[in-house]
């Protein structure tokens, strides 16, 4: 991968798809072609770009620019430890490619879920209306690349007034070295629907590779979605992700994002409250150490009246790691009676760890209730002293306080088996980094 993107391979790929009309649609080829055109006019961002000034992704240029290939021979027993007890609805992608044998849908009568290519013939109209329409790629080279390589993808459609009792688990597993995979997710919640979606990125090896993902979510009136996103990739990997959410009248979106892995990770979340009385709650936790860099950029855009949004983002940075948070809330002139709050809380566990946080409010309406704040600090010495007075060692006291700081976000995950996995991961990391 280089600063300037060579599109010759992408153009050959597009021609191969065009030669197989039974496997694609004209609108999809047109979407890919538009993405390739956008890639050809863009370069990889650098620290000279304002939105990337704290995040240096130049190490990506040292990896070979080679897309991952299908054909993994994984068996269920190889990845069973990643399955969730409550999630009988499961779509598994290996290096970005769909695996039918590892996937399962427990509620096929109530839920439309599957790989993009399998649903093109039966859901063409709704796919064309939403795929590639929520995450713009004209000024986003990573979204453009993902769209140019668009072939497989997780599609979840929840029909009108349908409540899916069990979570839908989208599991993306990395197995190949020095490749780039392009995961894609699309969630459509029709009027009055309810669903819990888990977007989970994991690895079976600890080599360098790139994951470049795009997720698009559209909720119709009175639809509810809980979106849990977990990034636990290789410590040598690079994770670049874009997610866009569109909320209609009185819809409700709850998001919890957990970032544990990757050498460099960047997650951009754009939530648009496009109609009255829409609500969103966005929580995030980045737990990093060594020389990891975790960057989270969010934008909550209130376009209509009576909207509500609440956001809490936490970072725990140890060793020489670097956490970045940029959270923007926009309240447009028509969005009167908006209620919005944002909090960025950051914990530094070493003198060499670094956090750059930038909460932002842009308010263009006068009848609103909005607040934001940010804190960066170390563990409270009085709290450590209190725990030591109760018989804990200083290391145990520090570990307990660090665990409690992160567990506040994880405790909100409604899927108990996933919550227990992540609580254990936080506990393991705090115990392995005594201060």
Image (spheres, grey):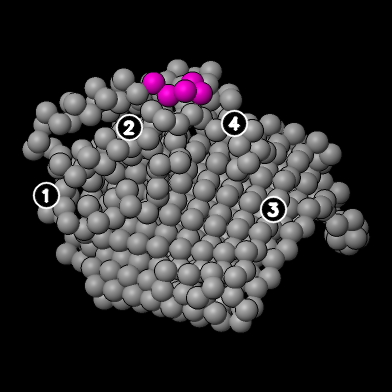
Q: Nearer the viewer, mark 1 or mark 4?
A: 4
64 up-or-down from 90: above or below: above
In the rendered structure, which disc, 4 or 2, sits on the residue that comes first in sequence? Answer: 2
Q: Nearer the viewer, residue 50 or 62?
A: 50
Tag shown at residue 46: 4
In the rendered structure, which disc, 1 or 4, sits on the residue that comes first in sequence? Answer: 4
Q: Specify the segment rendered in magenta.
A: 2-6
Instruction: Residue under label 1, please give it.
Output: 121
Calculate the distance from the C-alpha at mark 2 to the C-alpha at mark 1: 24 Å
Q: Return the x and y of residue 135 as percentages of the image width and height.
A: 40, 50
Q: Return the x and y of residue 106 as percentages of the image width and height.
A: 24, 58
Image quadrant in which the C terminus is located: top right
Callouts 2 and 1 close, C-beta under 8 Å:
no
In the rendered structure, which disc, 2 or 3, sits on the residue that comes first in sequence? Answer: 2
Q: Return the x and y of residue 160 as percentages of the image width and height.
A: 24, 72
Mark 4, Cα crowd under 10 Å, few <14 / some 14-19 / many 20+, is: some
Residue 220 found in image quarter: bottom left
Instruction: Residue under label 2, please give it.
Output: 36
Residue at 55%, 41% in the rendered image: 266
In the rendered structure, which disc, 1 or 3, sits on the residue that comes first in sequence? Answer: 1
Residue 113 found in image quarter: bottom left
Residue at 53%, 18% in the rendered image: 62
Q: Nearer the viewer, mark 1 or mark 3?
A: 3
Secondary structure type for disc 2: helix
Secondary structure type for disc 1: loop
Mark 3, Cα crowd under 10 Å, few <14 / some 14-19 / many 20+, is: some
């Amino acid at each position: 991968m280089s600063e300037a993107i060579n599109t010759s391979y992408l153009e050959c790929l597009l021609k191969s798809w065009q030669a197989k009309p039974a496997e694609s649609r004209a609108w999809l080829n047109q979407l890919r072609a538009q993405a390739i055109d956008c890639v050809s006019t863009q370069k990889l961002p650098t620290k000279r770009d304002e939105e990337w000034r704290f995040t240096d992704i130049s190490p990506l240029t040292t990896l070979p620019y080679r897309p991952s290939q299908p054909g993994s021979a994984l068996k269920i027993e190889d990845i069973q430890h990643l399955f969730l007890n409550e999630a009988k609805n499961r779509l598994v992608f290996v290096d970005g490619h769909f695996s039918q044998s590892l996937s399962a849908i427990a509620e096929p009568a109530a839920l439309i879920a599957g790989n993009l290519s399998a649903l093109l013939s039966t859901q063409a109209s709704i796919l064309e209306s939403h795929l590639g329409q929520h995450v713009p790629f004209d000024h986003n080279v990573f979204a453009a690349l993902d769209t140019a390589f668009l072939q497989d993808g997780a599609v979840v459609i929840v029909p009108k007034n349908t409540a899916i009792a069990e979570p839908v688990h989208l599991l993306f597993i990395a197995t190949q070295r020095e490749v780039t995979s392009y995961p894609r997710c699309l969630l459509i919640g029709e009027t009055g629907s309810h669903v819990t979606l888990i977007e989970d990125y994991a690895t079976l090896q600890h080599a360098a590779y790139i994951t470049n993902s795009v997720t698009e979510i559209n909720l119709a009136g009175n639809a509810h979605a809980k979106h849990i996103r977990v990034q636990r990739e290789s410590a040598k990997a690079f994770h670049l992700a874009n997610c866009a959410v569109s909320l209609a009248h009185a819809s409700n979106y709850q998001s919890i994002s957990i970032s544990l892995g990757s050498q460099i990770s960047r997650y951009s979340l754009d939530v648009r409250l496009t109609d009255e009385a829409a609500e969103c709650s966005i929580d995030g936790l980045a737990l990093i150490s060594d020389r990891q860099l975790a960057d989270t950029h969010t934008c909550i855009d209130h376009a209509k009246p009576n909207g509500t949004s609440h956001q809490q983002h936490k970072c725990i940075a140890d060793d020489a790691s670097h956490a970045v948070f940029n959270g923007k809330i926009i309240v447009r002139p028509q969005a009167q009676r908006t209620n919005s709050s944002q909090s960025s809380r950051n914990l530094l566990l070493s003198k060499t760890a670094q956090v750059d946080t930038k909460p932002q409010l842009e308010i263009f309406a006068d009848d609103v209730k909005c607040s934001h704040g940010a804190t960066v600090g170390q563990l409270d010495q009085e709290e450590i002293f209190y725990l030591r007075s109760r018989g804990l060692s200083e290391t145990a006291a520090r570990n307990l306080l660090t665990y409690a700081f992160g567990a506040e976000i994880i405790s909100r995950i409604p899927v108990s088996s996933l919550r227990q996995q992540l609580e254990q991961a936080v506990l393991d990391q705090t115990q392995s980094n005594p201060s």
